[in-house]
Image (cartoon, grey):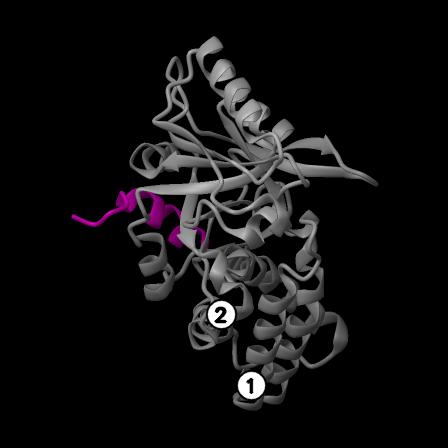
Amino acid sequence: MRWRARTIVQLYRARWAIRPQLKRDPLGGRHPDLISMAPTPLLDSLINTRPPQQLYHYTSVHGLRGILSSRTAWATAASYLSDARELRHAIDLARSRLSQLQTQASSQGQGQLLAYLREQLERIEHHLVCVFSLSAAGDLLSQWRSYCPPDAGYSIGFRTDQIVPLLHSEACILSPCVYDPQQQVALIQEAVDPVAAALPEAVPTNDANLRELGETFVPQLFTRVALVAPLIKDSSFFEEREWRMVWMPSAENITRVEYRAGRAMLIPYVPIRLGAAGSAIPIGEIIIGPTPHQYLAMNALTGFLQRYSIPWQAVRPSQIPYRQL
């Protein structure tokens, strides 16, 4: 039996379908017709990768309290993450691939259409995809430094055997990040190539018609690239062993998107349920980050967990000396 229920893979493969034929709907708008399903062996393999027994989320004391009390994870819009380079590497790979395909175009018009799609990738930041980061490493110095405030970090270990079934009902995928450059290129090719293959050979070369035709393929290209982009990480971050929950909106669930206050603007996010109704959040252990007051922090945390009847398997201090922070 595959590790993941096939429903979640089928859900995202359906969103990857290429719809190049146009028809008018009753309201006068135009939308593509589904004509084919593109195979996605690498994405399917990633989604079906068995996660470790626990995956950890590094956070502040405020984040810890919010997650435990609400039993939800806030998956943040990828374009609003603190590191502005998060999606840039994947976009650059997609642009490079479209440039390669342009040299193989069967007509001048098709080549111009590929060039148009390449330029439109700069707009992908407006395409909503939300992510929640986890790590297979629960006590890692680089993670404490990057994702937690000094003296006040926590690493929450979630039991994946109970988290994964909940993610299916949330229309959310869980996947390891891809650090290998060759795999990254292959993943982008899976996203981009079927869109290019669906382009017609006879393409009008005047600007207005070219733009109109190109815009019918832009949503498909954006959806496919945006789904895999959060999984692509620079190889220098391999030590983090990151996994990500990835959520994309549909017409049925777009109203789930909420907004929190950031330092300079509102930040879109979607709450992902981590505990079934009436049940506790599935926590394996919580690690107290390096701090001069670890045992006070442990006493307060265990008191909080008991007060709100939140079961856990272990609360322990980090093994990293405080002076290394």
Task: From the top left corner, tell me how far across and down residue 47 is, in percent.
Answer: 35, 53
Q: Name the image quarter holding residue 282.
A: top left
Q: Is residue 317 above or below residue 313?
A: below
Q: Is residue 168 left or right of residue 318?
A: left
Q: Residue at x 64, y 34 (%)?
A: 152
Is 38 situated left or right of 102 in this image? left
Outermost residue on the top side: it is 307
Name the foreground residue: 157 vs 302: 302
Q: Which residues are magenta?
A: 1-15
Q: Which residue is mark 2?
A: 188
Query: Please, which residue is most extreme toward the right here?
Result: 264
Q: Is residue 187 left or right of residue 291?
A: left
Residue beneath the point at 45% across and 64% down? 178
Residue 218 sits above or below residue 200 on the image:
above
Which amino acid type is marked by label 2? Ile
In this rendering, is residue 50 above or below 293? below
How far across and down, in percent of the image, does residue 183 sit? 42, 72
* Label 2 packing within 10 angstroms: few (<14), some (14-19), many (20+): many
- Residue 60 lies, in percent from the top left, at 62, 34
> Can residue 128 be seen?
no
Q: Which residue, given by chain and number where applicable, does mark 1 sit on?
A: 100
Mark 1 crowdedness (10 Å alpha carbons): few <14, some 14-19, many ≥20? few
The vertical placement of 122 against 13, above or below, is below
Residue 6 forms part of the magenta stretch = yes
Label 1 and label 2: CA atoms lie apart by 13 Å
Q: Earlier in the sequence, mark 1 or mark 2?
A: 1
Look at label 1 and name its amino acid.
Gln
The answer to whether residue 104 is seen in the rendering is yes
Q: Nearer the viewer, residue 199 or 184?
A: 184
Determine whether the residue tagged by mark 2 lies in a helix, strand or loop: helix
